[in-house]
Image: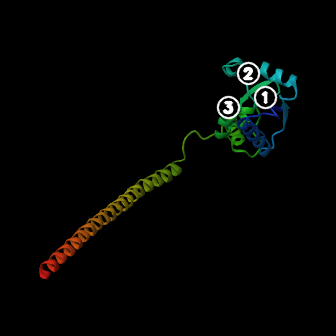
């Protein structure tokens, strides 16, 4: 099976270029064989892609934009659905491929097929998880207390600065008043 990625080599849209690079780069990172089919330079590729994207997956204008991904003739999806599969760690399922040996998905599928899948939590794990959750809950109030102390300290500093500023104004006013009084005293002494 060959994964087909329909791309536009000469797209003027940087968003499309970035999406194309993201898909190709991820497939290369997973070492998945794929073929790049250019819709900009090959009219047959463009027509095939447009005809084989399902109607419900086409945008309102009816022309699907690259990248579009197929597994042979089967439509897998566009960039948005690829991105969702990537986020959900389900790219192999998205592409219609079997996960490689050693991958977590492969091990889960095999375990379920063999009937070895654990449907219940391990009680020891559950107790450990519950204890961790309690620790987190106990730590949160301490963080909140520290945050509220920091906020209170900041408010006190601001109030102190405002008071000092007011005191500074009073001092300046008093200073001016003293100067005026001294001038008046000097003037009255001269008379």
Secondary element under disc 3, as helix, strand or loop, is helix
Label 1 environment density (alpha carbons within 10 Å; few <14, some 14–19, many ≥20): many
Label 1 sits on residue: 70
Q: Measuring 54% from the left and 44% from the top, which residue is drawn there? A: 121
Mark 2–mark 3 Cα distance, whole angstroms, equals 17 Å
Q: Name the residue at the front extreme.
A: 191
Q: Is residue 55 above or below residue 128?
A: above
Residue 144: percent from left, percent from top: 38, 56
Which residue is at a point 26% across and 70% down the rendered structure image?
172
Describe residue 127's horizontal placement relative to residue 8 as left or right: left
Q: CA distance from mark 3 to mark 1?
A: 12 Å
Task: Please state which of the two labelled residues, at mark 2 or mark 3, is closer to the viewer.
Answer: 2
In which quarter of the view is residue 135 placed?
A: bottom left
**Residue 42 in the image, given as x and y percentages of width and height:** 88, 26
Q: Tell me which residue sits at (70%, 17%) in the image.
A: 55
Q: Position of residue 90 (x, y in %)?
A: 68, 37
Q: Dot 3: within a 10 Å radius of its alpha carbon, few (fewer than 14), some, or many (20 or more) residues?
A: some
């Amino acid at each position: 099976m060959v994964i087909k990625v329909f791309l536009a080599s000469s797209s003027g849209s940087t968003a499309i270029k970035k999406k194309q690079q993201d898909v190709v780069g991820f497939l290369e990172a997973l070492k998945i064989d794929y073929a790049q089919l250019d819709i900009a330079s090959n009219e047959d590729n463009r027509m095939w892609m447009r005809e084989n994207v399902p109607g419900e997956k086409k945008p309102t204008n009816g022309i699907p934009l690259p990248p579009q991904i197929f597994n042979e003739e089967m439509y897998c999806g566009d960039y948005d659905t690829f991105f969702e599969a990537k986020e959900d760690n389900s790219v192999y399922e998205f592409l219609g491929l079997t996960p490689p040996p050693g991958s977590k998905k492969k091990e889960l599928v095999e375990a379920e097929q063999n009937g070895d899948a654990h449907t219940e939590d391990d009680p020891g794990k559950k107790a450990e998880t519950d204890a961790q959750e309690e620790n987190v809950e106990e730590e949160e109030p301490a963080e909140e207390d520290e945050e509220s102390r920091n906020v209170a300290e900041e408010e006190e500093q601001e109030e102190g600065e405002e008071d000092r500023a007011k005191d500074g104004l009073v001092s300046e006013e008093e200073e001016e008043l003293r100067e005026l009084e001294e001038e008046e005293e000097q003037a009255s002494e001269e008379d």
